Amino acid sequence: MMPLEQVRQQLETLGLLDAAAVLENRLDRASHDGISYVEFLQDLLRVETQARRERYLKARLRLAHFPAVKRLEDFDWAFQPSIDARQIQALASLAFVAEATNILFLGPPGVGKSHLAIALGMKAVEAGFGAYFVTADRLLQDLEQAYHEHRLERRMRVYLSPKVLIVDEFGYLPLSRVAATLFFQLVSARYERGSLILTSNKGFADWGDVLGDPVIATAILDRLLHHSHVVNIRGDSYRLKDKKRAGVWGTPPATPASPGDSLGGSNLVGASGSNFDRR
């Protein structure tokens, strides 16, 4: 057997499959460029390291259950000028993960809440943190079923173990008493232990109606907002922008707002955060 083939087999035996696949190509390049043995070995191992990292990230992203690939680089900042891009880029540093700080994106449908939440979650995975994405409806259905089947503690661990838990579309449907209590338990268990990124179309003043109990709503918000960044997004739906340009979708007439209807409550309006922004 030729030495080249022996080396290739040895690399495969060691599990260095990507290095084995490019061995001959890298030998030819080394010979042509006259690089040293150390530089050749460094180049070969770089191929293997990069391939392994790509496989690792792909697996972690799959385990995170992101519904789509969304990145900050692809976000249309010009379409949503109410968002402070500098604040979001600062959050992308992932200091919030190390500090177990929560992020709450509030705003009407289609303004980019889920995109930003997923993008930050992907940043966390790429940095080596565990992340998990779930819609609020699916999360609470899952926990409620586990509660009735007497396996809540085991199922709760699925949502407690990731450093970043993303709960999307909270508030679209009212919750049962059991579901509201389970959500309180989850928020309490993650408090100061892991970050929660939550998107909602409801202002905090409406959470009592969503949860069916103002006391539980207050207790949940107390824990969520203690260490948090609140991003309140105002604007049109990105998904409907082409329809509006074509005149297919008109702007509905404005409805007079009643006191307390602000998405962020009396002191939480503004994309740059709130009084709860960092404590």
Image (cartoon, rainbow, N blue to C red):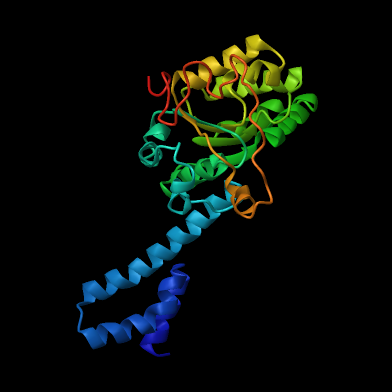
- Quarter of the image holding residue 175? top right
* Residue found 38% across the figure and 80% down from its top: 23
Q: Nearer the viewer, residue 89 or 159?
A: 89
Tell me the quarter of the image containing the N terminus. Answer: bottom left
> Farthest top residue?
215
Judge by depth and name the residue closer to the eye, 21 or 270. 270
Which residue is nearer to you in this view: 86 or 133? 86
Residue at the far right: name it.
Answer: 148
Identify the image quadrant of the C terminus: top left
Q: Position of residue 226 (x, y in %)?
A: 46, 18
Task: Please tell me whether residue 123 is drawn above or below residue 190 in the rendered image.
Answer: below
Q: Is residue 15 visible to the viewer in this orientation of the structure?
A: yes
Quick check: 249 above or below 252? below
Residue 238, horizontal then vertical, whole percent: 57, 47
Query: At 70% across and 30% down in the image, what residue appears?
Result: 140
Q: Is residue 275 left or right of residue 68?
A: left
How many discs mark residues in the rendered view?
A: 0
Residue 155 horizontal side relative to residue 48, left or right: right
Q: Is residue 34 above or below residue 17?
A: below
Q: Position of residue 34 (x, y in %)?
A: 20, 84
Residue 66 in view of the camera: no
Which residue: 50% across, 15% down?
Answer: 266
